[in-house]
Amino acid sequence: MKKITSLEDLRRIKEQSKDLTSARSGGKTRIIVGMGTCGIAAGAREVMTVILQELDRRGLKDVAVETTGCIGMCQKEPLVDVIRPGELRTTYGDVGPADVPRIIVEHIVNGNIVEDKVVGQTD
Amino acid sequence: MALYRAHVLVCKGTGCTASGSGSVYDALKEELERRGLDKEVMLVETGCHGMCEMGPIVVVYPEGSFYCRVTPEDVPELVEEHLYKGRVLQRLLYTTPDEEKHRIPHYRDIPFYGKQRRIVLRNCGYINPDNIEEYIARDGYQALARALLEFSPEETLDIVKRSGLRGRGGAGFPTGKKWEFARMAPGDKKYIVCNADEGDPGAFMDRSVLEGDPHSVVEGMLIGAYVIGSDEGYIYCRAEYPLAIKRLVTAIQQAEEMGLIGDNIMGTDFSFHLHIKEGAGAFVCGEETALMASIEGKRGMPNPRPPFPANSGLWGKPTNINNVETWANIPQIILNGAEWFSSVGTETSKGTKIFALTGKVNNTGLVEAPMGMSLREVIFDIGGGIPNGKKFKAVQLGGPSGGCLPESMLDTPVDYESINATGAIMGSGGMVVTDEDTCIVDFAKFFLTFVQNESCGKCPFCRIGTRRMLEILERICEGKGKMEDLDLLEDLAQKVKDGSLCALGGTAPNPVLTTLKYFRDEYVAHTVDKKCPAKVCPALIQYTIDPAKCIGCTKCARQCPVNAISGEIKKPHLIDQDTCIKCGQCMAVCPVKAISVE
Ligand SMILES: Cc1cc2nc3c(=O)[nH]c(=O)nc-3n(C[C@H](O)[C@H](O)[C@H](O)COP(=O)(O)O)c2cc1C
């Protein structure tokens, strides 16, 4: 382990270590993947894996990834919800692994909804 | 570093470990691997959450679901439901102890936590105490960096002084002032000591801080050493705290590897080395002069003050000694400022205090409350009141040196002055709650027995006086007491207080004095009426079977450990009073409530 010899060193370790505990604090963007039997059958697990890889690759630490059960829109699975702090909950349907980078860059990073995939918005 | 979408925190504090969190952790590890979730779900060991009653505790983030009394058998369902399918597993959630039995999904909504203010315990149960990076991620060692790189020792001292922090080890001495004495004391070599002896029965605040967030104590000591001009420190921790010691060893090692302990810390000319000294668990070794004697390898006995440790402590050098909780407050004060800290609490007592809530209370565990909160709020709002619909009787504050307060004193705010005015002391924060089934004389006898055993024997009044007091209490409990005994107790109590060198003897009579003050009727009942109102003292009670109600089921006779009950099947039974040991087991098993106690 490298020694800390300055405030910059300490700040750097703090930044690197942030995602060690970031999943435990609230108040940030959430991605919720439908993991009911329907979601899993439609490929939600692969979508989940790609989401995690993509967030990691882009160094997006302040995003919580959660799972949820079936919401009754099984024909649209895999369903992925995105909630940015203070904004509406946007539900995307028929999400495949290839759609993930677009949703992350456009919606999570830039704040623009990916219209062609949206199935609905709620509070 | 891989990204984990969920974190599963398993409490590995002493309480949860005792109720089996180790095998829950192993089962989780196995199940997550089996399900292929181990790359996206992180499994973390943490320290104590405070709600030991509900252990083993497992918290799942990002939802913050708080699962109680989790067993290895629950694990497959928990993983399947929550982590695979994303459904909170309702049946393991915390449920309120009241009639309504509300299930509470989120950690922060549990009433036990709602009224607390967690400054010292902010990381306990939240981070992995064996990983310095998690501590750093939560602003760890930032306070040290600021002190070393931005503030002079004088400026740092000034912040601590202005914060109003007072020692959490019992006496409540202003910490900044104590540091100033040691800083001003002449000498090149100075020591810093952390008092982690924690000998009060029922107290586990310091243990939980050391187990759950050891770096906060280490960082506090580093800042103290910088202010005072010390380059060497000791943590004196009882050997009965193996987990706390293990975590401290790891913490010190990691801090050394990162260059946060050692020579030229953070590129400055400040150097500091830290050792752990394991004590053998004597109560008197928590007293600072006895503690230092013990570190020096001598028998742990108190010495007269002055000279105070600030001038002549360890090996005759200026020494500053503080309690675990005192040290753990320091980084937060430096980070957030004196004004932030002094905005919490009362006029004379700033910040928070951790209490170990035990005895007859629903939520036994660890509670951090702002100073000034009333005892009633701590016991009833946070502690959830008395179990099984029983009535509150008394609360013992401050351990064996403290005092016992009745219902009528429950609105007393917890701050040093208000508690002292009642005859009790804040002490280190033990809070033992009793219900109507507790005999107050017996309760006082318990604490007096403890100090009697733990007296080091140096001062005759403490050694022999407490022995004589105990004999009087035993007499009273046996129904052989006289009214003069009560005066004799008070007289002796005063002499033990006056005639003892250290506060062990100085406070030993407190439980007796406060119970005599607030529960005199109960002493009189034992002495004059020869009755124990709580029906506890064996010599003063009798179990009898009502022949009209007894159905002769023989359950009691089979239960009785000394064969004191006789009778034919389907005929009324009889208790032989000479053989009966008054254990009450017969009454507990009787299906028709035919047995009573008077
Ligand atoms: C019999 C006896 C036992 C004590 N036990 C402890 C203890 O376990 N932990 C502690 O911090 N202080 C204990 N103290 C108080 C210490 O002597 C000392 O006041 C304290 O460590 C100072 O730290 P503080 O200023 O941070 O409170 C005890 C005192 C007496 C008389």
Image (cartoon, helix red, strand yellow):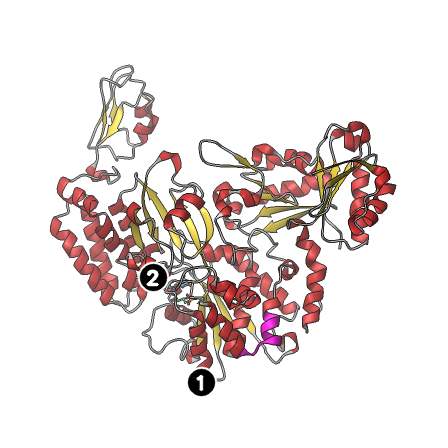
Q: Is residue A44 left or right of residue B438?
A: right
The foreground one among B544 and B571 is: B544
Query: Which comes sooner in the sequence, label 1 or label 2?
Result: 1
Rendered view: B379 above or below B398: above
Indicate yes or no whether the magenta region holds residue B148.
Answer: yes
Residue range of the region highlighted in magenta in the rendering: B144-153
The kind of secondary structure element at disc 2 is helix
Check the picture and name the quadrant holding the C terminus of chain B.
Answer: top left
Residue B455 image-quadrant placement: bottom left
Q: In this view, does B318 lie to the left or right of B211?
A: left
Quarter of the render that holds ligand 1: bottom left
Residue at the image position 40 percent from the left and 71 percent from the top = B293
Residue at the image position 37 percent from the left and 66 percent from the top = B287
Provide the major secondary structure of the magenta segment.
Answer: helix
Q: Which residue bears the numbered disc 1?
A: B186
The chain letter under disc 2 is B
Residue A51 image-quadrant placement: top right
- Tell me the CA gap for discs 1 and 2: 33 Å
How packed is label 1: few (under 14 Cα within 10 Å), some, or many (20 or more)? few
Q: Which residue bears the numbered disc 2?
A: B417
In percent of width and height, residue B575 lies at 23, 27
Check the picture and name the quadrant holding the N terminus of chain B.
Answer: bottom right
The foreground one among B317 and B227 is: B227
Rendered view: B469 above or below B340: above
